[in-house]
Amino acid sequence: MSESWLGLEDKVIIVTGGASGIGNHVVTTLVKAGAKAVIVDLTVETGEEKDGAYCVQCNVTDPDSVNAMTKAVLDKYGHIDGLVNNAGINKPRLLVDVKGEHPEYELDVKTFDQMFAVNVKGLFLVAQAVARELIKQGHGAIVNMSSESGKEGSQGQSAYSATKGACDSFTRSWAKELGKYGVRVVACAPGIMEATGLRTPAYNEALAYTRGVKPEDLSTDYSKQVPLGRDGKLDEVGNLVAFLVSDRASYITGTTYNISGGKSRG
């Protein structure tokens, strides 16, 4: 069988948070491209298959769990070619609830720590564990999932935005550290995207309060916000990630790619 343009056939690519949302669309895109995608998620059981991908249960905030996950992938396939560092959480919170009507939507230490544990600590732990293997091999790619909010900020999502700013900084720094070993590190920053299925009524209620509107009035008219006049499709993110983790992007490292329909600055 001839190799496809991306050349991802039989490449072993780990996708954290791959059981749902953007991560799941990344997984399905990789599987269609012939890669051996590995779903790493709290919600799966090690050894099962989902959407054509092998699954490994992992808590990305726990070093022992991350190391066990890496070993499980190596035991299964013998090597790792890439990582998509996608696991993340977002809880809309105001710095100060000036109205005082919903103190639960004011940023507190517990919520702050939760977001930084998954989005920053987890990003670091998984990247470190996988990078050790990529360095030994002398090749590989890490794609970190950032967000346009890491560049632009986002009302009611300051802590989340800060975690994505950290993601961008990690990306640039790790690229400088790992380049000499043949390992690339890039990031992907989605803007306004179609619904992922992860936006619960509770999330929308919190977001609406931080924006000073009712949940039913959250804007879905993107014609004035996004130059392309629409929200992004999750498969479009999957396509970008598949390119970035492939050897077709072999001279790309240390940068964050916006995928926001023109809404974000470069």
Image (cartoon, rainbow, N blue to C red):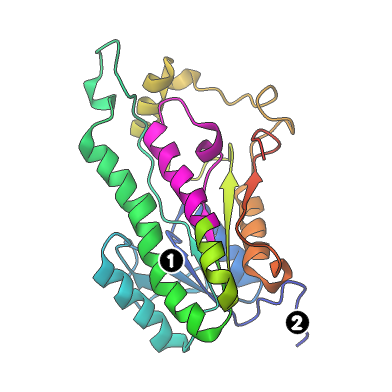
Of 127 and 23, the residue lying toward us: 127
> Which residue bears the numbered disc 1?
127
Q: CA distance from mark 1 to mark 2?
A: 28 Å
Q: Looking at the rendered structure, which numbered label has been put on residue 90?
A: none
Which residue type carries mark 2? Answer: Glu
The kind of secondary structure element at disc 1 is helix
> Which residue bears the numbered disc 2?
3
Image quadrant of residue 92?
top left
**Whole-percent x and y of residue 5?**
77, 73
**Whole-percent x and y of residue 176?**
56, 63
What's the residue at 35%, 82% (across, down)? 71
What's the residue at 34%, 52% (across, down)? 118
Report the magenta residues as a range.
143-172
- Answer with mark 1 or mark 2, whichever residue precedes in sequence: 2
How packed is label 2: few (under 14 Cα within 10 Å), some, or many (20 or more)?
A: few
Which residue type carries mark 1? Answer: Ala
Left or right of 123, for residue 59: left
Left or right of 217, for residue 29: right
Q: Main secondary structure of the magenta part?
A: helix
Asked whether residue 129 is drawn in magenta, I would say: no
Left or right of 197, for residue 252: right
